[in-house]
Amino acid sequence: MKHGISNIDGLLLFYRKGCKHEDVECRSKAVSRKHLLGEHLELHMFASAIRENKSIASYLANGLVETEQIVRRHNELAKEMLNRGYRHRSDISEEDIRVIKKYSARNGNSGHVNVERSIRDLLARCNECAQRIKVHAPLRSEEK
Ligand SMILES: [Zn+2]
Ligand SMILES: [Zn+2]
């Protein structure tokens, strides 16, 4: 895997300042099939954990989930799955949306995702993500 520090910094900039497209669109396009499907599945797991009243405290503490963002992020990923021609047949139910909202409101700290760390992990672990990041989330010219 060959990607220099500038690649990582470019992506961090993109996350902080946005890129030439809608942020959301780029962020979803910049992940590999494996990680798109993986993150999607993970969001469903968080939704059912909350519904079934299972503890997600360690995920919250480790910056791995932001409960207020579960539904929005799920829908972004689902849209990207359809864009790529994958199947998506697992909407988050209205009932789950209500439960997640309530849970987030009740827990003043609904968690915070450590985006920089997630990106560094993806770049280090996944060649396809690194390639997609180059294509979909390049440095903006004035920042090169
Ligand atoms: Zn789904
Ligand atoms: Zn990947």
Image (spheres, rainbow, N blue to C red):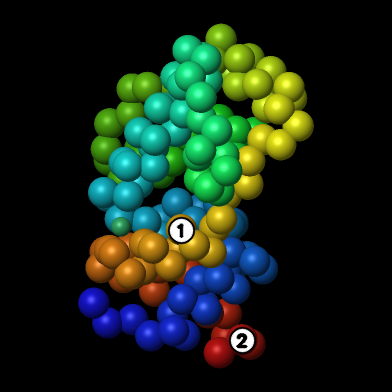
Q: Is residue 102 left or right of residue 45?
A: right
For badge 2, the amino acid type reads Glu
Reading the chain from its start, which is encountered first: label 2 or label 1? 1
- In x, y percent, where is residue 6? 47, 85
Q: Nearer the viewer, residue 93 or 105?
A: 105
Asked if residue 123 shows in the view, the reply is yes
* Disc marking residue 87: none
Asked if residue 75 shows in the view, the reply is no
Residues at circles 2 and 1 in contact by the CB criterion of under 8 Å: no
State which mark lies toward you, 2 or 1.
Answer: 1
Against 17, residue 79 (above or below) is: above
Residue at 52% in and 15% down: 53
- Asked whether mark 2 and ligand 2 are closer than 8 Å, the reply comes as no
Residue at 59% in and 73% down: 13
Q: Nearer the viewer, residue 2 or 86?
A: 2
How many numbered markers are drawn?
2
Quarter of the image with the N terminus is bottom left
* Disc marking residue 118: 1
Q: CA distance from mark 2 to mark 1?
A: 22 Å
Determine which quarter of the picture holds residue 119: bottom left
Element assignment for label 1? helix
Element assignment for label 2? helix
Question: Mark 2 highlights which residue?
Answer: 143
